[in-house]
Image (tube, rainbow, N blue to C red):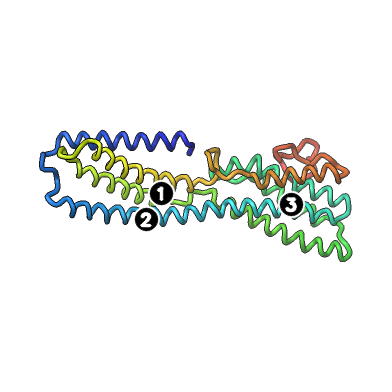
Amino acid sequence: MKLWQIVTILVAANVIATVVMFTLRRRMSPSGHFRDSQLAAGALAVTGTIFAVLVGFVFLLAFQSFQTARSSSQDEAVAAIGLFHVAEQLPDAERDRLQADVVCYSRSVVHIEWPAMADQRSSPLVEDWASQTAQDFERAQLGGSVASGAEQSWFTATDNLQRGRRGRLAEASNFVPAAIWLLLIAGGVVVVAYVFLFADLREGRLPQWAMITAVTTAVTASLLMVGYLNRPYGDHEGAIDPNAMRDVLRTMERERDVGSTHHSPPCDTTGRAARGTSDRSVSG
């Protein structure tokens, strides 16, 4: 959700609540609804507290999900650069092939899968590059103690890469289910509707406006915060960007241009398989 949308929803909710409040004021009896306003205010306090507890609990879980998505994407980037550096210990041909696979994997994550996650989808292309990387490593001719150590490091980094990707994708789906949203919205409506019963011609317009605006803003803002954390990926402000993987990708491309004998990975700049790579299993 973009910033202007948040502001629009807040303003619209307050305008509607204010119109309803002042409409009820004109139709209220001079004595109001309550004989004991303190008792009525106590009931409102209990209702508001219960709503705040519910929202706070969901907010905490949504925040943890948001943080998990961020940390998983960073872990995946660290594992990708780890694979790239492990490949440096292998013979030149195997090194160049595996480093190119990791570069293509990273490109497809940044340019293909990340936009797809905004729609709660993954990209088969990223999975294809991961599989291609594993196949190329299995075909590599390894030998000696150095290669044995590289093999162990490679499997560890691969496991971390897959774990990071699974964690990132797991948080792409909406964390808060529709049933919870229904309960939260119903609770917020009840709190705001109860405040309408305090409409009173004997009170000034400013205090009445401040009361309904404060409650409506608090309820609406609480729901918007949960909704914001419920969508960690997208093009809205504050969404998680592939900055970690993008930084790692720049490092890999720079190092590969310096040390590799083959400067063109088997993919274009977005991670899709380049022309002339039909012998490989990856397709764009």
Residue sitting at x 78%, y 43%: 253
Q: Earlier in the sequence, mark 1 or mark 2?
A: 2
> What is the count of numbered marks?
3
Residue type indicated by callout 2: Leu
Pick whichever, 260 or 5, lies toward us. Answer: 5
Q: Quadrant of residue 204?
A: top left
At mark 2, the secondary structure is helix
Q: Earlier in the sequence, mark 3 or mark 1?
A: 3
For label 2, the residue is 54
CA gap, disc 3 and disc 1: 39 Å
Q: Quadrant of residue 203?
A: top left
- Quadrant occupied by the C terminus: top right
Q: Residues within 10 Å of mark 1 (few under 14, many from 20)?
A: few
Residue 113 position, x and y percent, is: 62, 43
Q: Is 161 displayed left or right of 2 in the figure?
A: right
Q: Is 40 displayed left or right of 191 in the figure?
A: left
Pick whichever, 227 or 113, lies toward us. Answer: 227
Residue type indicated by callout 3: Ile
Q: Earlier in the sequence, mark 2 or mark 3?
A: 2
Mark in front: 3 vs 1: 3
Q: Residue 114's mark?
A: none
CA gap, disc 2 and disc 3: 42 Å
At mark 1, the secondary structure is helix
Residue type indicated by callout 1: Ala
At mark 3, the secondary structure is helix
Mark in front: 1 vs 2: 2
For label 1, the residue is 178
Outermost residue on the bottom side: it is 145
Pick whichever, 197 or 210, lies toward us. Answer: 210
Residue 228 position, x and y percent, is: 47, 45
For label 3, the residue is 81
